Amino acid sequence: MSLSNGRAYLAIPGPSVMPDAVLQAMHRASPNIYEGELHDLTDGLIPDLKKVAMTDQHVAIYIGNGHAAWEAALANVLSRGDTVLVLATGRFCVGWGEMAAGMGAKVETIDYGPAAPIDLAQVQDCLAADKDHRIKAVLAVHVDTSTSVKNDIAGLRAVMDATGHPALLMADCIASLGCDRFEMDAWGVDVMVSGCQKGLMTPAGISFVWYNEKADAARGDCVTTYWDWRPRTRPEMYFQYFDGTAPTHHLYGLRKALDIIMDEGLEAVFARHATLAQTIWAAFDKWSSRGPMQLNIADPPCRSHAVTAVAIGSPLGDKLRYWCEHTCGLTLGIGLGREPADAFFRIGHMGHVNAHMIMGVLGTIDAGLKALEIPHGNGALEAAAQVIAKAGTADVGAVRQVGDACCG
Ligand SMILES: *Cc1c(COP(=O)(O)O)cnc(C)c1O
């Protein structure tokens, strides 16, 4: 007997679940790249990409993953020898800083460890001490996917302003865009990077850099022809959008994904992710009351709505993941950036995810804890169902009407 046949759920924090409509939009012959539909489609993506980032500034599209967007962003603002301040709250900001170092920047890091957000007071002190304004840019990750911490980016801007420091604020929203609220302009972010394979529900392969005029004016000597964002945002010819052949099928997929997001409404997308995250936390509150399993981030306001990192003790992380995948068809994310990795696992709940999928994840984990005899508190699924039920009470009136119409 196998209980895993049927539709699998890849609940890893990217790539995320792709809507069938996105896949169908990509299932086509190659389009003409010189004129016609693809050009109109690409022009139409730009305003929607600005909407999801809540910005009126510029956006450049790159053929590449999130790492490509990291390099693009750095290349456009840095000169060799510039100093960048890395605010590390997990593996990803460290990685972005390593990339800056590889490009010839001096990297200063404040490391908050694997289970805490950025301490804004400490950043303020650090910037205030930088009297000569050597720091050219502050690098922060909105949601670090390894730890599932969410940082206060608006608060970061506030402490930068409070010190009068002119550094650029650069944010990685690869795991949060289209899941957690992010407001580029209102929060005073100068450069933001994201990819398409997480909240934007499109196969990995294109990524984006949003930037404002201040960031553009900072331009240093690291910029190279391919990474230069200017021709991509002010194209005189279509091919300049991509510096070569357009990523044709990705563009069709992204168009459909953005349609799905706009149809639901960005506020509704945020609210859905928030409710589903609270559903997961409610289950963990119960499970964690006994036994080894704990959420990595203790403070709810500092938790991502798109990914949840869990500590469970070595080697139970790997055992539980293996059981869920092979017995039930649920793939959980590996522990990342923590040692030993098999003491952790992560749940991806970003993008095309709904209540029954989350209840399925939680039910599967509950079964796994029992099968593997991992001690845990009771009542997790009950608590999760309560969150869904409470959030869904607004729909009960509509259900009653349907019931009256069918059965009355
Ligand atoms: C996924 C991710 C990255 C890396 O993106 P790739 O597409 O794998 O290169 C960087 N930062 C964060 C926060 C991420 O979640």
Image (tube, helix red, strand yellow):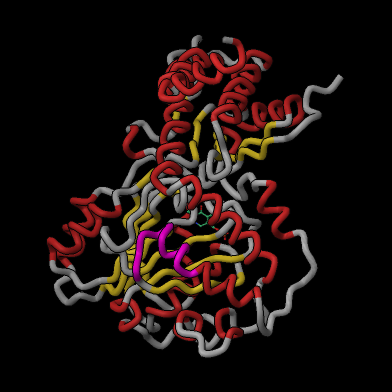
Q: Residue drawn 56% across and 15% down?
A: 403
Residue 317 sits above or below residue 99 on the image: above
In-front residue for pair 298/400: 400
Q: Residue drawn 33% across and 61% down?
A: 184
Q: Residue drawn 46% across and 80% down?
A: 233
Residue 111 sits above or below residue 380 on the image: below
Please tell me how many numbered marks the rendered image carries: 0
Q: Does the magenta-highlighted stretch encompass residue 53?
A: yes
Helix, strand or loop: magenta stretch: helix
Horizontal and vertical percent for residue 319? 67, 28
- The reply to whether residue 389 is in sight is yes
Q: Does the magenta-highlighted stretch encompass residue 297?
A: no
- The reply to whether residue 284 is in sight is no
Q: Quadrant of the C terminus?
A: top right
Q: Residue drawn 75% across and 25% down?
A: 327
Horizontal and vertical percent for residue 160? 20, 62
Q: Please provide the residue range marked out in magenta.
A: 46-56
Would residue 294 appear left or right of 186 to someone viewing this image? right
Would residue 152 appear left or right of 193 to someone viewing this image? left
Horizontal and vertical percent for residue 344? 55, 34
Residue 4: image quadrant is top right
Horizontal and vertical percent for residue 333? 60, 40
Q: Quadrant of the N terminus?
A: top right
Would residue 279 appear left or right of 128 to someone viewing this image? right
Q: Residue furthest right?
A: 1
Would residue 24 appear left or right of 396 to someone viewing this image? right
Residue 384 sits above or below residue 147 on the image: above
Residue 223 sits above or below residue 157 on the image: below
